[in-house]
């Protein structure tokens, strides 16, 4: 009979840990949470000090009964859930559900599932940290209040089944704000000038870019300005002004945090944040390796620290020296560069055993497991390696106050880049200029002028949204992936070619939140709430104090919104479209994908058809109506009603006004109209009667 019982969260984790402990230990999984707030109600006793009403999660009764039997057999119980706030809360809930108050029980944590870490945690067993539990309770209660109080307002205003959230609503607002910024963006014309310069005796020319004019910085805004410069340069000869040679270095990257792993996996592997976390969880809990059983390959995956243990760093240094040589060993201490508070004492995400190279175990991993493990492994190894060194040479040419410059770089020592390449957009050429000095005769073969237009901000991707949330201090490592998954699942946003776009439904939800609950979707408020949760974890603030201060403001906002909504008669919009089945006028309805037309005789008549909103503009191709449409995923665009016979479409709203320069379609950008033809670039004020 087992003397000791260890309770973990997942069966995979239980299997990995079991092999490290002797026959005196039984390891069982709770399969995640066992208690939570009820789904049927808010589950918070506001009148009784905001006490949460926890209940056993449906379907966990049999599991808890089995766990109670094992508890009775054991002399000592160890709660070994994940080493973060949520894991601490799960351990606390287990202690309550299993009634461990009268048992000999302790909490153990480990950052990696290895023999040394697991056995070491038993020697450092402790009581449950109630500050961590309370920080998680505060988060859960605040999120429940926001969700259960605000969501009904959205049901009245828009449609049933919608939801709001303390973090998800801010994330949605960021995406909507970026979409508005892109839609309002007006391209500005600018020109660049390069000189194709050929050194005497060389077969190849190099390009030098205009950097200064007699008036200062080279800013050319029109073709007329460019022609004037070309005319002045045609009268003079470029000569060599300066040659500067130097060595520059590129620092090794920091090891991964949760956020940077999600960003890099999105960029290099095209992984969704949810997929990255799912596969990382598998690598952390354990993968079956031949002759070794289940092995945890990486350290804990939810962390905002870049700290590496001395033992792991020493092991990496030894491995690097053996595989690459003494010169490749890093000398600088890696520090967290964001200056923000680290939530816990976790290490960065790293391999548990640096000798288990990805190539060595490739055959025993799935394709996605291998790719993510390789990314984590190489990044960690690179973080312990020396800098990469480049030889850099800068040439400056001058004529009559005009200055051209060219820079050439060459990698002379790869350092960390031997295992982890980083793209550098600033490297203009790969090889150094050959045999150029003060006496070299340089011939300008050609002056190359190019017209450009400024580009709008990029749409958010999952990776760049995570980066923005982290920069603003919104959410924590464990919240990024579920937040994005939620607003995708609710169809507030869609993902196309990695980019995130807001849907019509998402716009409606965001506008309602901005109008009725501006504080909830305020980024500063949400970030400040995260810092309060940190202070609860530190034991500085009582968690109920935070909730008590938050609730009255929320109640006031809810009451104000409900008063306003009482005066709004939400009726179906009647259209001139006739039902094909019964002849009634169709009405506009809201569904999971946005608006559609339906017969008001439902349920007797179930006829529906797509809703196309005419915008009062004739198609420039065929003269028929331009209507507001949506892609299959819900992203809005404007197209001809006669599609597919007519292929006109635009992501921006077209205007009835035509371009004065080329007679092309003009697109609305805020209070401006911009020509659809990017090569034209004509911009004018939007007519006042259309603003």
Image (tube, helix red, strand yellow):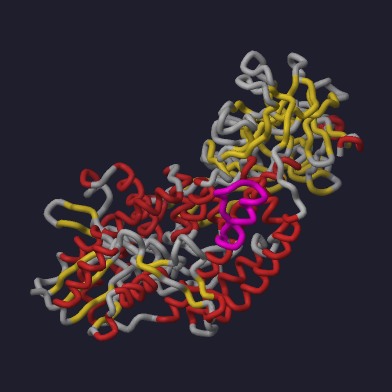
- Where, quadrant-wise, is the N terminus in this rendering? bottom left
**Which of the pair 238/260 is nearer the observer?**
260
Please report the residue visible at 27 percent of the width from the left and 61 percent of the height from the top: 10
In the displayed structure, 86 sits above or below 238; it is: below
Name the spot of residue 393 as percent of width and height, x first: 59, 48
Name the spot of residue 45 as percent of width and height, x first: 52, 75
The stretch of residues the image draws in magenta is 147-165
Please report the residue visible at 62 percent of the width from the left and 49 percent of the height from the top: 175
Name the spot of residue 550 as percent of width and height, x first: 62, 73
- The residue at the far front in this view is 604
Displayed quadrant of residue 457: top right
In the displayed structure, 217 sits above or below 346; it is: above
Does the image show residue 563?
A: yes
- The residue at the far right in this view is 688
In the displayed structure, 289 sits above or below 401; it is: below
- Residue 161 lies in the magenta-colored region: yes
- Is 476 left or right of 320, judged from the image as shown? right
Does the image show residue 386?
A: no
In the displayed structure, 418 sits above or below 593; it is: below
- Is 331 left or right of 249, judged from the image as shown? left
Please report the residue visible at 83 percent of the width from the left and 20 percent of the height from the top: 663
- Where, quadrant-wise, is the C terminus in this rendering? top right
**Which of the pair 68/491 is nearer the observer?**
68
- Is 367 left or right of 130, judged from the image as shown? left
């Amino acid at each position: 009979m087992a003397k000791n019982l260890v309770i973990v969260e997942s069966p995979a984790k239980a299997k990995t840990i079991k092999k490290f402990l002797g026959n005196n230990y039984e390891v069982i999984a709770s399969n995640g949470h066992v208690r939570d707030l009820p789904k049927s109600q808010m589950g918070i006793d506001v009148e009784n000090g905001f006490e949460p009403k926890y209940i056993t999660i449906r379907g966990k009764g049999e599991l808890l009964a089995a766990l109670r039997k094992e508890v009775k057999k054991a002399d000592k119980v160890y709660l070994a859930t994940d080493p973060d706030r949520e894991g601490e809360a799960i351990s606390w809930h287990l202690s309550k559900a299993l009634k461990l108050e009268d048992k000999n029980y302790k909490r153990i944590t480990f950052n990696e599932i290895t023999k040394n870490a697991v056995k070491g945690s038993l020697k450092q067993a402790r009581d449950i940290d109630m500050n961590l539990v309370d920080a998680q309770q505060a988060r859960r209660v605040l999120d429940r209040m926001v969700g259960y109080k605000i969501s009904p307002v959205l049901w009245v205003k828009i449609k049933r089944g919608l939801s709001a959230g303390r973090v998800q609503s801010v994330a949605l607002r960021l995406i909507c704000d970026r979409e508005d910024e892109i839609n309002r963006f007006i391209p500005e014309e600018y020109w660049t000038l390069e000189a194709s310069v050929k050194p005497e005796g060389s077969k190849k020319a190099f390009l030098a870019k205009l950097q200064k004019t007699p008036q200062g910085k080279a800013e050319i805004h029109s073709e007329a300005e460019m022609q004037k410069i070309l005319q002045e340069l045609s009268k003079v000869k470029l000569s060599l002004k300066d040659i500067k040679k130097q060595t520059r270095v590129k620092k090794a990257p920091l090891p991964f945090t949760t956020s940077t792993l999600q960003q890099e996996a999105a960029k290099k592997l095209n992984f969704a944040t949810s997929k990255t976390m799912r596969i990382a969880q598998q690598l952390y809990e354990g993968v079956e390796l031949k002759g070794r059983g289940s092995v945890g390959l990486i350290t804990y995956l939810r962390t905002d620290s870049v700290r590496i243990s001395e033992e792991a760093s020493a092991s990496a240094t030894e491995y690097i020296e053996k595989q690459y040589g003494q010169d490749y060993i890093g000398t600088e201490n890696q520090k967290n560069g964001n200056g923000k508070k680290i939530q816990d004492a976790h290490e960065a995400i790293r391999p548990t055993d640096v000798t288990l190279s990805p190539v060595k175990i490739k055959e025993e991993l799935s394709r996605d497991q291998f790719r993510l493990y390789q990314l984590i492994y190489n990044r960690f190894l690179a973080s312990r390696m020396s800098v990469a060194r480049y030889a850099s040479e800068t040439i400056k040419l001058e004529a009559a106050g005009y200055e051209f410059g060219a820079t050439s770089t060459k990698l002379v020592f790869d350092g960390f880049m031997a295992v982890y390449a980083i793209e550098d957009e600033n490297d203009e050429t790969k090889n150094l200029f050959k045999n150029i000095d003060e006496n070299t005769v340089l011939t300008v073969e050609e002056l190359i002028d190019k017209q450009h237009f400024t580009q709008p901000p990029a749409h958010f991707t999952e990776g760049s949204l995570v980066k923005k949330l982290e920069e603003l201090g919104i959410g924590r490592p464990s919240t990024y992936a579920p937040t994005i998954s939620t607003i995708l699942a609710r169809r507030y946003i869609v993902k196309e070619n990695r980019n995130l776009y807001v849907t019509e439904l998402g716009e409606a939800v965001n506008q309602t939140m901005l109008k009725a609950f501006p504080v909830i979707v305020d980024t500063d408020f949400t970030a400040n709430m995260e810092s309060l949760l940190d202070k609860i974890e530190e034991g500085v603030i009582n968690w109920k104090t935070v909730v008590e201060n938050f609730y009255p403001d929320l109640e006031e906002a809810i009451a104000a919104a409900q008063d306003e909504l009482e005066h709004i008669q939400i009726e179906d919009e009647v259209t001139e479209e006739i039902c094909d089945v019964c002849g009634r006028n169709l009405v506009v309805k809201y569904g999971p994908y946005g608006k559609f037309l339906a017969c008001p005789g439902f349920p007797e008549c179930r006829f529906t058809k797509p809703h196309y909103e005419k915008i009062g503009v004739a198609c420039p191709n065929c003269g028929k109506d331009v209507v507001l449409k949506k892609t299959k995923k819900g992203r809005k665009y404007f197209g001809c009603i006669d599609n597919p016979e007519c292929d006109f479409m635009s992501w921006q709203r077209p205007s009835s006004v035509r371009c004065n320069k080329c007679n092309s379609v003009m697109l609305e950008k805020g209070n401006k109209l911009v020509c659809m033809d990017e090569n034209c670039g004509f911009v004018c004020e939007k007519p006042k009667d259309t603003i």
